[in-house]
Image (spheres, rainbow, N blue to C red):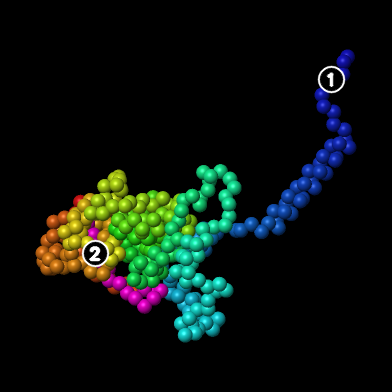
Amino acid sequence: MAPSKGVVVTVPVLVLSVASAAIFLFFLLYSLSSCSCPISTSAGTGTTSSADNKRSTTDRISPTAEDIAWVKDQIQQNNLHMQLNVLRKGINPRSRVQQLEDLNQFKGISHYEGDEAKNHTSLQCPGELLVEEHHSNYGEPWAGGRDVFEFVAESVQLKPESHVLEIGCGTLRVGLHFIRYLVPGHFHCLEKDELSLMAAFRYELPSQGLLYKRPLIVKGEDMDFSRFGSGFQYDLIYASAVFLHMPDKLVWVGMERLVARLKPYDGRIFTSHNIKFCSRLGNEECTKRLASIGLEYLGKHTHDSLLFNHYEIWFEFRRSKV
């Protein structure tokens, strides 16, 4: 009779196999017992995860009382004082005027070696922008833009997915902060000044790493908002010291055109300094005029600046009917 076919396992091999499995199991259990993995907690413990902390920090807009106290404490601990209000200059100090002279005289000593199509220097950036002369165009510190953003954004409980329109964003003194906070494409602006637009596109957005946010900034005047598209409504429309420089009639034209683009009841229009376009009509007539286009005046706000000795007056409106 022919021997049967099959797998034959000898006793020594079987013993070695069992011993190997036992050793592997021992090391596996040991590694699990000494694991330093984080222990999950239930929702009822009140413990916040790192993701929750990150989210709350991201959503925060203005500094807290603890933030301000920390800054004061750091200045005190380091015994910092301004001596005659003069900061120490650098090793090779240059004023903006001197920097601009150098840029115009010495246009670069390097020679580009590569595909000319990839040569970014062919897209010239005006020297005036490189020395940030446009930061002095506002009659007040450039840093005030952050103050305006914090006040207005918190007043409307702005969310990253909100839609915002600025009328006259200039060189993005305020707009940069909205662009950084909002999701891509949700910041819109109508601006008529070409130099301001060049500063926004050629200097501010690249220098702040915000080109990927793709803000819709349109050159135009006469309150023409036709290029901003449709299919959405703004959560916030604001104008910082812009209506002061426009004829009353044009301001009313713009307000009427914007009503349908503003979210009913929840959307807000904020304008700063004064509303003479309205108050010059008289209180009663102004209220009637607003009601006729579907707007309601909600009140006046005084905003104090954390960064410098300054405050602004803001006026708030909402859409009163669909």
Say which residue appears at 47% left-offset and 61% top-offset: 104
Q: Secondary structure at mark 2?
A: helix
Q: Nearer the viewer, residue 245 or 270?
A: 245
Residue 139 can be seen, yes or no: yes
**Taking 243 as reference, is 222 above or below it?**
above
Residue 73 can be seen, yes or no: no
Say which residue appears at 19% left-offset and 57% top-offset: 250
**Taking 65 as reference, is 317 above or below it?**
above
Q: Position of residue 156 (x, y in %)?
A: 32, 62
Residue 91: quadrant of the picture? bottom right
Q: Nearer the viewer, residue 248 or 275?
A: 248
Read off the magenta span.
305-320
Say which residue appears at 82% left-offset and 24% top-offset: 6
Horizontal relation, residue 87 to residue 61: left or right: right
Horizontal relation, residue 50 to residue 271: left or right: right
Q: Secondary structure at mark 1?
A: loop
Q: Position of residue 108 (x, y in %)?
A: 54, 57
Which-is-in-front pick, marks 1 and 2?
A: 2
Which residue position holds label 2? 245
Q: Is residue 42 magenta?
A: no
Farthest bottom residue? 84
Q: Position of residue 36 (x, y in %)?
A: 66, 59
Q: Position of residue 60 (x, y in %)?
A: 43, 64
Please say if the residues under marks 1 and 2 sit with CB atoms less than 8 Å apart. Answer: no
Q: Nearer the viewer, residue 315 or 106?
A: 106
Q: Label 1 is placed on what type of residue?
A: Ser
Q: How busy is the neighbourhood of tag 2: few (under 14 within 10 Å), some, or many (20 plus)?
A: few
Which residue position holds label 1? 4
